[in-house]
Image: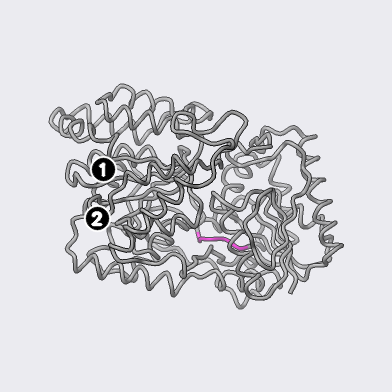
Amino acid sequence: MRVLIFHGYLLRGTGSNVYNANLAAALGRLGHEVQLLCQDRDPPALPGVTVHNPDIGRVLPVYVADRYEGFDARPFPQLSDEELRRYLDANVAAVREVAAAAPPDVALANHLVMGPAIVRRGLAGAAPYAVKVHGSALEYTVKPHPERFLPYAREGVEGASAVLVGSRHTAQSLWAALGDPDLPARTRLGPPGVDVGVFTPRTSEEAAKGVRHLASRLATRGEGGNRATPDRPTPEGGSSFDLDPAAAGAALARLRPGEDRLVAFVGKLIVSKGIDLLVAAWPLVLAQEPRARLVVVGFGAYRDAVQRMVGALAGGDLRTMRELAREGRQAEGGPAGRLELLDAFLDRLEGDTAAQGRYLAAAAQAGERIVLTGRLEHDDLAELLPACEALVTPSTFPEAFGMVPVEAAACGAFPVSAAHSGLAEVAGTLAGAVPEDAREWLTFPTDERAVEGIAERVVAWLRAPPQLRDATRDALVETVRERWSWEGVAAGVLAAAQGRLAELPPPPADRVPPA
């Protein structure tokens, strides 16, 4: 079967990028011919996949402010009408050209805007298509600016055979935003997948060897180019996706698997990912488990603020912590607005002299016990995660799915996630498999005690009896293998595009997340 996929961005770094790279690869392995439209000028080798880069000029519309090398990346709302029109026209022309040269049997349009409208216009009814909603376009663009972007979303979705979502939360948010009473009947569950042949658990010796090998390999990777550094994480004119192999290798070389008790964060360094809460929680973890070490893997506009936060903790400087809490999104170039959960934690800390003393004593080790690697390639995570005992996903903004927690679980790392949206649904599935004593540690509420909630769950897992930890890890690994695989995802996408809705599960009924 010939499949056309419109993505429009890169094929590495973030969730939707990784989704499309892995989906295309799975379709290729299944024997299908894939025509993939994106903006990755140096795509990975994907057998059976032909990559096309539509000529959109310099302006690349994005959902969250960021930098891409070779582009003027700007959030959709900041585009003029003329810039938006040029972007649409260029991509529609590219889809039309690819479809004329290699007529597709089915297609997939990613992102609520502008992919579905582009595919509908470009194909003009020549092939059926499905829409994959990843979440960012819905939450950051369509819902905040419905008067401008809702018409495009409706246009693209109306022509689709099916709409795929990663969770019940995203489905409900989508239905409410579009207001189409017929849409629920065409909405099906279509989460990402995991390469369970790559993301696998390892023995402690194998895991330690994997981290050392990864650090060495990164340290000796090619030199030169427009690279990030710890003091200048995103070079002027460069991209947030830039990878500095030497710096990443040096950071990973600081880890001591077997001696350190490693806990990971993997995600974009932006405020909505809740990285401020996790960093603030780390001294609370260290106070009870001094060998704990947090490995922060990611890139983004908030990285400078994270480094300031780590420095402030190490220096006992709660004033700077308070300033960062009050700056909020301004620290990443966003609008004013304080980080309320971090601010509330600092209020409690300043109101308890004894607790503050214990916190600052542990925080003095933050510079050593919190390691920022910068961006890693997706496959590199399969070398790091098996050495980690846990992974924390502290997002304060709705997530369509919990891909990183699922990948961590596949490696045997315990995933601690915020108790909302798609994260809670993933945690709910895992909670049904793990021993009862471990279930409550899978999620934490994003309320004013979120910082303490993160620390309590990480510490509880690190201190859990060995028998409970072993049984929990086995259950996590087995559940991921049974529930998620890329070949299954690919088959679901084809069924959705062809309108075979009876073969696909609807979004799950509302459930109460684990406490």
Residue 167 part of the magenta segment: yes
Q: Quadrant of residue 237?
A: top right
Q: Position of residue 1 (x, y in %)?
A: 73, 74
Q: Relative to residue 483, is residue 44 depicted above or below? A: above
**Sequence-first tag of 2 and 1:** 2
Q: How packed is label 1: few (under 14 Cα within 10 Å), some, or many (20 or more)?
A: some
Label tally = 2
Task: Measure the alpha-carbon separation of dots 2 and 1.
Answer: 26 Å
Q: Which residue does the image show at 20% across and 27% down from the upper left?
A: 351
Task: Say which of 475 and 159 sits in front.
Answer: 475
User: Which residue in the protein does label 1 denote?
Assistant: 452
Residue at 71%, 67% (x, y): give it. Answer: 161
- Which residue shows up at 39% across the image and 59% down it? 408
Q: Is residue 300 left or right of residue 109?
A: left
- For the magenta stretch, what is the residue range? 164-168
Q: Quadrant of residue 347?
A: top left
Is residue 425 among what the camera can see? no
Which kind of residue does numbered mark 2 sit on? Gly
Q: Which amino acid does the dot numbered 1 rest on? A: Glu
Q: Is residue 148 left or right of residue 191?
A: right
Other-residue count near label 2 (Cα within 10 Å), few / some / many at <14 / 14–19 / ≥20 = some
Residue 366 is situated, as x and y percent measured from the top left of the image, at: 27, 35
Q: Which residue is mark 2?
A: 258
- Residue 76 visible from this viewpoint: yes
Between 414 and 245, which is closer to the camera in this rendering?
245
In the image, residue 325 lies in the stretch drawn in magenta: no
x%, y% of residue 28? 65, 70
Q: Secondary structure at mark 1?
A: helix
